[in-house]
Amino acid sequence: MKMNNCQVIKLEERLDSANVVDFKKEASKVINSKTSVIILDFSDTKFVDSMGLGSLVSILKQTAQKDKSVILSSLSPHVRQIFELTKLYRLFNIFESLESAKKSICSDLDVPE
């Protein structure tokens, strides 16, 4: 099912206690916009701690309450392993690349980043 109004949020090298507040603020702005699908681009992210994982679960809940979706893309092997060890991969739609997420989810060809 393809949806309009996809928006990409590119995460920093680390998603941890040092930057999780800023990440949640940015995500909340997108959640409260007209965007239907949020794609979180992990291509530069090498590390996620428990605060980062908690923020992702919080964002997942917020999007579900507003009948929106959050998609993860481009997880490094280390970050993917964290999702597998914590079983969080079961909660999220995860795509190998940002491009594959866009092609599968977004109906508009020019997706804002």
Image (cartoon, rainbow, N blue to C red):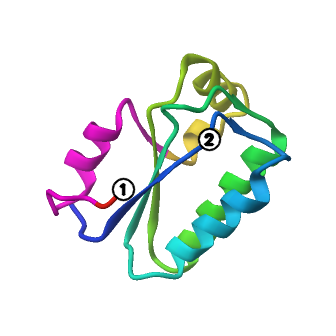
Q: Three-letter amino acid code at disc 2?
A: Glu
Q: Earlier in the sequence, mark 2 or mark 1?
A: 2
| Residue that appears at 26% across and 49% down | 102
**Mark 2 surroundings: few (<14), some (14-19) or many (≥20) residues within 10 A:** some
Q: Which structural element holds mark 1?
A: loop
Residue 101 image offset from top left, x and y in percent: 31, 44
| Residue that appears at 75% across and 46% down | 52
What residue sits right under mark 1 in the picture?
113
Q: Is residue 95 magenta?
A: yes
Q: Report whether 6 appears left or right of 82.
A: left
Q: Is residue 55 visible?
A: yes
| Residue that appears at 39% across and 74% down | 35
Closer to the camera in the image, 109 or 106: 109
Q: Report whether 93 appears left or right of 89.
A: left
What residue sits right under mark 2 in the picture?
12
| Residue 37, above or below 34 | above
Closer to the camera in the image, 38 or 60: 38
Q: Report whether 71 appears left or right of 106.
A: right
Residue 58 image offset from top left, x and y in percent: 70, 62
Residue 77 image offset from top left, x and y in percent: 56, 17
Magenta segment: 93-111
Quadrant, the N terminus = bottom left
Question: Hey, which residue is sitting farthest top in the picture?
Answer: 77
Closer to the camera in the image, 3 or 7: 7
| Residue that appears at 62% across and 41% down | 12
Q: Three-letter amino acid code at disc 1?
A: Glu
Q: Which structural element holds mark 2?
A: loop
Mark count: 2
